[in-house]
Amino acid sequence: YPNLFRSAPALQVSIAGPGHPLHAGQQAGVAVTVRNTGDVPLYHVAVPPSPVATPPACPDPQVGTLAPGESKILDCTVTAEQATFPATVTVAGQYQRGDPQLTVSGSAATTIDVVTPVVAVGLTDSPSVVRGGQPATLTFTVTNKSATAEGPLDVTVGTSPDRKSTRLNSSHI
C-alpha cells in the first residue's frame, strides 16, 4: 500500500525575453516563470548559483514556497556576449520541508541574439592635391553592412598639422 500515497513533485521553468537583438555588453531583462506542476507544495524554491558562464542574473533568486499549480515570475537580466548565446536558468526546491535531500528542479533556455555592427567608411576628396589656403571638400560615405539598423554615428576627423578635430554631422545609419 505504500504506492497509494506517493507524491509527484514537479517544477516547470520557462524563460522569455528580451525579444530583440542586443549589442555586445548590452543588458536586457528576461522573465523567468517558475510553476509547481506537481501535487505537493514545494519549499525553498530558488535559482541556485550556476556554473553556466552566462546565466541570467536574478537580483532576488528566492521564489519561496509554491503550492501545487502556483507560479511566480522572477525579473532577471542578461548581459550580451560577443555573439549569439544561450541563456539557461535552473530552479530547484524541496518537496519535503526541511529535507535538502528531497529536491526537484527544472531548467529552461532561450537564445539571446547578439548583433555586431559592421560599418564601411569611404572617403573621397576634391581636389586630391591641395595648396595652402585652397578650399578642399572631403566626402565621407558611411554604409551600414549589418543585418539590423544601428543608432547614431559620430564621425571625428583629425586635421594636420595641429591635430585639432572637427565633429561632423551625426546621423542614424
Image (cartoon, rainbow, N blue to C red):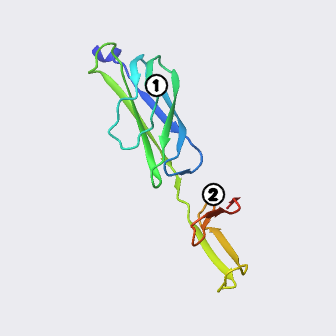
The residue nearer to you, when weighing 43 against 87, is: 87
At 69% across and 59% down in the image, what residue appears? 170
SS of the residue at dot 2? loop
- For disc 1, the neighbor class at 10 Å (few under 14, some 14 to 19, many from 20) is few
Near-viewer residue (138 or 165): 165
Q: Is residue 64 left or right of residue 128?
A: left
| Side (left or right) of 153 relative to 59 | right
Count of labels shown?
A: 2
Q: Which mark is residue 150?
A: 2
Please, is residue 170 above or below residue 67 in the view?
below
- Where residue 77 sits in the image (x, y, percent)? 50, 37
Q: Which residue is mark 1?
A: 60
Image position, residue 67 (x, y; %): 47, 16
Badge 1 marks a residue whose secondary structure is loop
For the point 71% across and 61% down, which residue is it?
169
The amino acid beneath tag 1 is: Asp
